[in-house]
Every structure is written in C-alpha cells, then in structure tokens.
Image: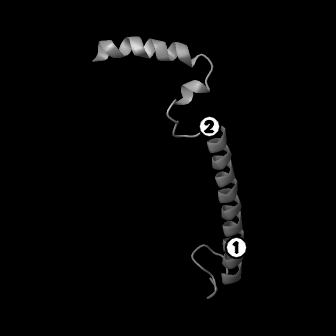
Amino acid sequence: MADNMSLTGLSDEEAKEFHSIFMQSFLIFTAVAVVAHFLAWAWRPWIPGAEGYGSVIEGAHNVTAAVSQIAPLAG
C-alpha cells in the first residue's frame, strides 16, 4: 500500500473528490427535503388551529359528533 493511501484504499485526491461529491449530494438532498417539508406544511399544518383539521376534512362533523357522545362515557 502506498504512503498516500487511506484505510479505504483511496488516495488523498480521490478521498477529497469523493468528499466533495458526497457533500454536494447531501446539500441537494437536504434542500429538496426542506422544500418538501415546507410544501407539506403549506398544504396541511402539522399543528392544527383552534378548529383543528375537522374544518378541512370532509365528513369530520360525523366524527366530532361520535367523539362528543363517547367522551361523557370516558369521564
């Protein structure tokens, strides 16, 4: 093994090139993930407002009515 080889078998120049490509790929992946999370948040916030998700989900009034009838039984 040559003196300029690392434990991976890559030379210093090859290791630096791999690191550069890895970092660019990681930054692109992270940017895509951030954009996807922002778009998901814009579509449906993770923390619902005062009215909850029921105002946007069709048929949620039936679920709310069922829960309000079950809630006194649990108390």
Q: Estimate the spatial distance between the alpha carbons at disc 1 and disc 2, rounded to whole Å.
A: 36 Å
Q: What element does badge 2 sit on?
A: loop
Q: Residue at x 65, y 52 (%)?
A: 33
Q: Which residue is mark 2?
A: 44
What's under tag 1, amino acid-wise?
Ser
Residue 5 position (above or below residue 67): below
Residue 47 position (above or below residue 16): above
Q: What element does badge 1 sit on?
A: helix
Closer to the chain start, of discs 1 and 2, is 1
Residue 24 position (above or below residue 34): below
Q: Residue at x 31, y 12 (%)?
A: 73
- Packing grade of label 1 (10 A; few <14, some 14-19, many >=20) is few
Instruction: Please tell me which residue lies in front, 32 or 64.
Output: 64
Q: Residue at x 70, y 82 (%)?
A: 13
Q: Position of residue 4 (x, y in %)?
A: 64, 86
Q: Position of residue 66 (x, y in %)?
A: 45, 12
Q: Where, quadrant-wise, is the N terminus in this rendering? A: bottom right
Q: Where, quadrant-wise, is the C terminus in this rendering? A: top left
Q: Which residue is mark 1?
A: 20
What's under tag 2, amino acid-wise?
Arg
